[in-house]
Image (cartoon, helix red, strand yellow):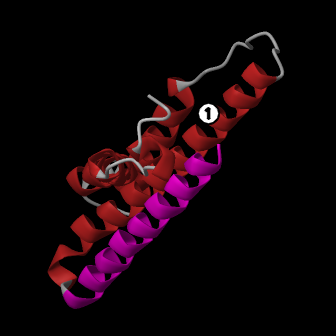
Amino acid sequence: MDELSSHLRTVTRITFLFLSLCFVGWALFPAAKPHFGGLILGTAASLANAFHLSWKVQRAGSYAAAQVKRRVNLGFLTRACIALLAYVVATKYFSFSLYGTVAGLFTAQLATLLLGFKAKSKPAARHSTDERGENN
């Protein structure tokens, strides 16, 4: 589970970098404020979804380690409600772009996907005993 925490930290950093770029775009391009506002709101909801999913995975792992019976959960419904809340806030209260909000909802998941591809492309760390064939 330690690897999950480090991946979540990296995804959080990537997402905050994207958020800072969105805020710079918000400040520099006043005509595109609805689009950048939607991206900001969608990205914040995406990060909340990533934290929620990480919490659920860690909880499922601890239940499996303790051999506790599986509990009924809502899973996808909670994350869908966070996305729906972002949509309602973006369109009803702030008049942000719906397309920007939906695009922002994919930010943390895209960062996770790119981080996974990067991790898979790295060769596994080899120990000196593996080179001599002792562990084959």
Q: Does dot 1 land on a helix, a strand or a loop?
A: helix
Which quarter of the rendering shows the N terminus? Answer: top right
Query: Residue 62: which quarter of the image?
Result: top right
The residue located at (70%, 13%) in the rendering is 72
In this rendering, would 97 be left or right of 116?
A: left
In this rendered view, identify the residue nearer to me: 121 or 90: 121
Magenta segment range? 1-28
Residue 69 in the image: state x and y as whole percent. 79, 9
In this rendered view, identify the residue nearer to me: 46 or 36: 46
Q: Is residue 4 magenta?
A: yes
Relative to residue 125, is residue 28 depicted above or below?
Answer: below
Q: Residue furthest bottom?
A: 28
Residue 64 in the image: state x and y as whole percent. 73, 20
The residue located at (56%, 57%) in the rendering is 6
Q: Is residue 19 magenta?
A: yes
The residue located at (61%, 33%) in the rendering is 57
Query: Which secondary structure dominates the residues rendered in magenta?
Result: helix
Number of residue marks: 1
Relative to residue 134, is residue 76 depicted above or below?
Answer: above
Residue 79 appears in the figure: yes
In this rendered view, identify the residue nearer to me: 47 or 97: 47
In this rendered view, identify the residue nearer to me: 136 or 9: 136
Which quarter of the rendering shows the C terminus? Answer: top left
The residue located at (81%, 15%) in the rendering is 67
Q: Residues within 10 Å of mark 1 (few under 14, many from 20)?
A: some
Query: Residue 52: which quarter of the image?
Result: top right
The amino acid marked with disc number 1 is Val
Q: Which residue is mark 1?
A: 57
In this rendering, would 122 be left or right of 133?
A: left
Residue 127 appears in the figure: no
In this rendering, would 9 be left or right of 72?
A: left
Query: Residue 133: which quarter of the image?
Result: top left
